[in-house]
Image (tube, grey):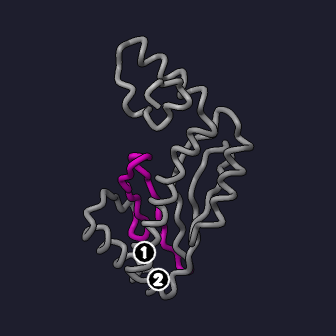
Amino acid sequence: MPQGRAVAAHLAELLAAEGLEHERPEPNRFVIVLPGRDKLRTTVSMTIGPQALVINAFVARRPDENAEGVYRWLLQQNTRLLGIGFALDSLGDIYLVGRIPVSGLGPDDLDRLLGSVLRASDESFNAILRLGFSSAIRRERAWREARGESTANLEAFADLTGDPTA
């Protein structure tokens, strides 16, 4: 698997150069933590096989409500993505997945691929929460307010929670 070894070497160099938190549980498998803005951490598994690089990144758990609306929105988002797409597991949890041929896959391609995963995960996160967890967000805000706790990280959802500063 000479191409796979080269891809693994490129990926190891990229992760070291970028200072990204990661583990390498097997020579051809990497588990990477990408820091985000809206979704604070996206954990990505990249497995390099003889023919393809397989990417899996957890985005969000199964929606509490409006699952059909969330899944429809995700399918619409897939039309903008390159090399990855939204998918569901057997429980309805939301992932980004991809399968890219290893032939000719270089350091710049790996960097772009990780950037695509981060951008898709981070940019979709609040929309997924808004569409599929609005009742939970309202309950969380009420719970925090009743205890005098900060609601600062719920500001993006002020319109859902009746915050007069929205």
**Dot 2: element:** loop
**27 lies left or right of 82:** left
Q: Is residue 19 above or below residue 163?
A: below
Judging depth in this view, the residue of 147 and 17 nearest the camera is 147
Q: Residue at coordinates 46% horizontally, 52% vertically from top-left?
A: 122
Seen at 46% across and 16% down, the residue is: 143
Give the numbered dot on residue 110: 1
81 over 126 or under it: above or below? below
Give the dominant element type of the magenta stretch: helix, strand or loop. Answer: strand
Vertical arrangement, residue 91 with respect to residue 45, above or below? above
Picture quarter containing residue 31?
bottom left
Residue sitting farthest toward the front = 165
Numbered circle sitting on residue 105: 2
- Look at the numbered discs 2 and 1 and tell me whether their residues touch, using CB distance below 8 Å: yes
In which image quadrant can residue 2 be found? bottom left
Query: Where is residue 147 shown, x and y percent of the image?
Result: 38, 12
**What is the span of residues highlighted in magenta in the rendered image?**
26-51
Q: Residue at x 46, y 60 (%)?
A: 119
**Image location of residue 134, percent across then percent down:** 59, 31
State the image coordinates of residue 32 (x, y, percent, origin top left).
38, 59
Judged from this view, the residue extending furthest toward the right is: 68
Question: Dot 1: within a 10 Å radius of its alpha carbon, few (fewer than 14), some, or many (20 or more) residues?
Answer: some
When asked about the image quadrant of residue 101, the answer is bottom right
Residue 98 included in the magenta stretch of the image: no
* Amino acid on which the number 2 mark rests in the picture: Leu
Amino acid carrying label 1: it is: Leu
Q: Residue at x 61, y 45 (%)?
A: 93
